[in-house]
């Protein structure tokens, strides 16, 4: 049953792949003609994409990596991963350096204007993490004013933090 759902997800993703830019003319047909699909990703988001030693070799692994490989197999093409910082993933698709992106990317209305997205296969929540001994000090966004808040550059969380915790120093 797990194999069935994995294959079904791969098929859906093939049709509605994350971040395919319409302006670049990326389609299953053009990918098949090139005989490869270039996938922009990062390598710091376990369990989705991360590096691990496999047989003594530094290897890109994870659920998203396996999904991209399944898409390549379904299309009958080689999969080439282009690993970069998260804030460059979508830009590489938009510029045509990559065909697709797969890196825990959140769908936003702004991003929908530029990219086509697959059906979502993972739902996450945004949370603020604080030291256990400071939990009573930070009970609202106002209590984070003048504090330093860390986010991942280029992520939805960076945008949310800058908007909702505008008096904090977002890094």
Image: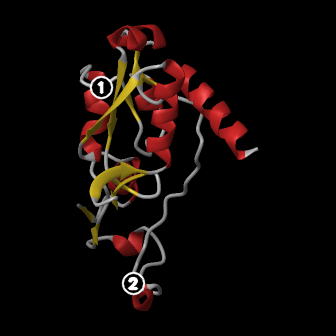
Q: Is residue 169 visible?
A: yes
Q: Give the vertical position of 136 relative to 2 (above or below).
A: below
Determine whether, in the image, residue 34 is placed left or right of residue 135. Answer: left
Q: Front-most of 22 and 145? A: 22
Viewer-closest of 56 and 160: 56
Q: Is residue 16 visible?
A: no
| Residue appearing at x 29%, y 63% in the figure | 167
Please give the count of numbered marks on the rendered protein: 2
Which numbered disc, 2 or 1, marks the residue that appears first in the sequence? 1
Other-residue count near label 1 (Cα within 10 Å), few / some / many at <14 / 14–19 / ≥20: many
Q: Residue at x 50, y 27 (%)?
A: 73
Tell me, for residue 139, which label it has, or none: none
Q: Residue 77: image x %, image y %?
A: 42, 21
Q: Quadrant of residue 119?
A: top right
- 29 lies above or below 48: above
Residue found at the far bottom of this picture: 133
Task: Residue 131: give its label.
Answer: 2
Check if mark 2's residue and mark 1's residue have beta carbons within 8 Å: no
Name the residue rendered at 46%, 84% in the picture: 135
Q: Secondary structure at mark 1?
A: loop
Locate residue 12, reporting x and y percent: 61, 26
* Residue at disc 2, secondary structure: loop
Q: What residue is shown with label 1?
A: 98
Q: Is residue 115 left or right of residue 90?
A: right
**What x and y, as percent, mark residue 58?**
27, 55
Q: Quadrant of the N terminus?
A: top right
Q: Residue furthest front?
A: 55
Return the x and y of residue 166 as percentages of the image width and height. 32, 58
Marks 2 and 1, how far apart in space?
39 Å
104 or 56, nearer to the observer: 56
- The answer to whether residue 26 is above or below residue 4 is above
Quadrant of the rendering where the C terminus is positioned = bottom left
């Amino acid at each position: 049953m797990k194999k069935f759902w994995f294959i079904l997800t791969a098929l859906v993703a093939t049709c509605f792949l994350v971040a395919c830019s319409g302006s670049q003319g990326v389609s299953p047909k053009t990918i098949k003609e090139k005989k490869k699909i270039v996938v922009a990703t990062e390598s710091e988001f376990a369990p989705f994409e991360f590096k691990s030693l496999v047989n003594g070799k530094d290897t890109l692994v994870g659920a998203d990596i396996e999904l991209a490989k399944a898409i390549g197999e379904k299309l009958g093409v080689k999969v080439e991963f282009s690993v970069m910082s998260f804030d460059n993933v979508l830009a590489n698709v938009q510029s045509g350096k990559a065909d697709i992106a797969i890196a825990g990317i959140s769908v936003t209305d702004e991003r929908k204007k530029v990219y086509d997205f697959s059906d979502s296969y993972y739902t996450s929540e945004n949370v603020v993490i604080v030291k256990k001994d400071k939990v009573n000090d930070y009970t609202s966004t106002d209590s984070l004013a003048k504090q330093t808040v860390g986010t991942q550059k280029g992520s939805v969380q960076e945008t949310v933090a800058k908007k909702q915790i505008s008096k904090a120093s977002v890094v």
